[in-house]
Structures are given as C-alpha cells and as structure tokens.
Amino acid sequence: DTGVSQDPRHKITKRGQNVTFRCDPISEHNRLYWYRQTLGQGPEFLTYFQNEAQLEKSRLLSDRFSAERPKGSFSTLEIQRTEQGDSAMYLCASSLDPLLTPEQYFGPGTRLTVT
Amino acid sequence: AQSVTQLGSHVSVSEGALVLLRCNYSSSVPPYLFWYVQYPNQGLQLLLKYTTGATLVKGINGFEAEFKKSETSFHLTKPSAHMSDAAEYFCAVSPLSGGYNKLIFGAGTRLAVHP
C-alpha cells in the first residue's frame, strides 16, 4: 500500500481559471476528507465522503467548489473561477470506519497558487 | 463548537532538551485527540492519538502525550529533542458525531531545534 496520493503536487493558475485536483485514498478506506491549509494555519475541514456519498460540506466550500467521488474510489476537487484567496494547500485524507479506528491518513497535498 | 488552542506558535529548544508543546481543547464531551507532525511541503503524519483508556499515550519518534480531562489539555512531550524533530506540530480534536471524525485543528506550533 502506497498511502494517500494527490495530483498535482503544485498548481499555478491565473485568476478566473478552473482547476481540478485528484486524490487517491488508501484502497480499503471508505471515508475520504478534503481540508484546506493556508499559510501559518492548521488545516480546515472542507468536505467528507463515505463511499461515493458526500455527507457534509463546510461553509468554507463556496458554490465555486465542487467535489466528487465516483464509485467510491478516487476523489476530485474542482475550483471554478479561481480567486487569489483560494491560494492554499489542499489536503486529502482517508480513513476506515472511525468507530473502529479514528486515524486519518493524509496525502502530501496540492499547493495552489492563484496569480 | 469545539476548538483547539495551541499555546506558542514557535518553540525553540536545544538538542537534547525537553520538548513540551501545549494543546488545550474545548468540547462538551470528551473527544478523540490527536497530534500530527508536518515537515515542509509535506502532508501530515500521525504522531499519536487518544481515544479511551490510558491517559498517557505513546507515539512514534519518542513522543508522548497525556490527556487531562480536568484541564482539557493534551500536551505533547519528548524527553530529548533531536535535530530531526524540527517541524510543525498540530493538535486536533474529533467530535466523532454522525459516524465520522471531522478533525478540528489548532493553528500549529513550529518547533526549532538548535545545536
């Protein structure tokens, strides 16, 4: 098992462009989470999937953000009409049923820079 | 609402000295508690966790933390700092409601270790 992977690792885009990030969780994990981390801050929860169902979205996730997890495997996070305030590290994490084991395993993140 | 406070955004210690990173949380019910470490341009790695049972938990790389319910604290310690411990450390709580564990992070403490 290679852990959680994210692609790309870095993305530079111009304001107003759309970007999409991908997360591949640990294969047997059915829970998947997206977090956003801005400079000097801890990660903030964005959204959560159990299998293919998106069960919670943070108020941080404006209508320009959309996340999917087709077939309950990999997940994508899309940001439309990017703004400079979207510049951040986007982290993906996965886990098993937290009632069994609560650890979340994080990927290396995608660093987005909006110019 | 749950929250996490990490006292001291920067901590500097000498190699071989005691490491103490402070974390206090607010929660109406005892949550799950975690410490994660983040090296530059990398994702988060779990150091240790508290769920139930023994209040002194041991983690990787010689770190340990003690859950003190009366003080709502979960401070991280290591008896002897090593240069490789220099990183950013995040304390997190999980309310474990709804069958999943959205992590709520503190702002982080950057640990510097000098010779």
Image: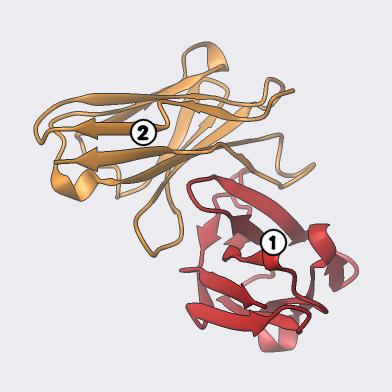
Chain colours: A orange, B red
Rendered location of residue A27, percent (x, y): 68, 20
Q: Residue at x 66, y 26 (%)?
A: A26
Q: Is residue B72 left or right of residue A49?
A: right
Quadrant occupied by the C terminus of chain B? bottom right
Q: Is residue B64 left or right of residue A82?
A: right
Q: Specify whether residue B1 is in view.
A: no
Residue type, label 1:
Ser
Rendered location of residue A34, percent (x, y): 46, 39
Q: Residue at x 71, y 80 (%)?
A: B19
Q: Is residue A74 left or right of residue A95?
A: left
Labelled disc at residue A56? none
Q: Is A36 rendered above or below residue B66?
A: above
**In terms of secondary structure, where does tag 1 sit?**
helix
Q: Is A7 rendered above or below residue A107?
A: above
| Residue identifier under label 2 | A10
| Residue identifier under label 1 | B84
Q: Please tell me in which quadrant of the rendered image residue B20 appears.
A: bottom right
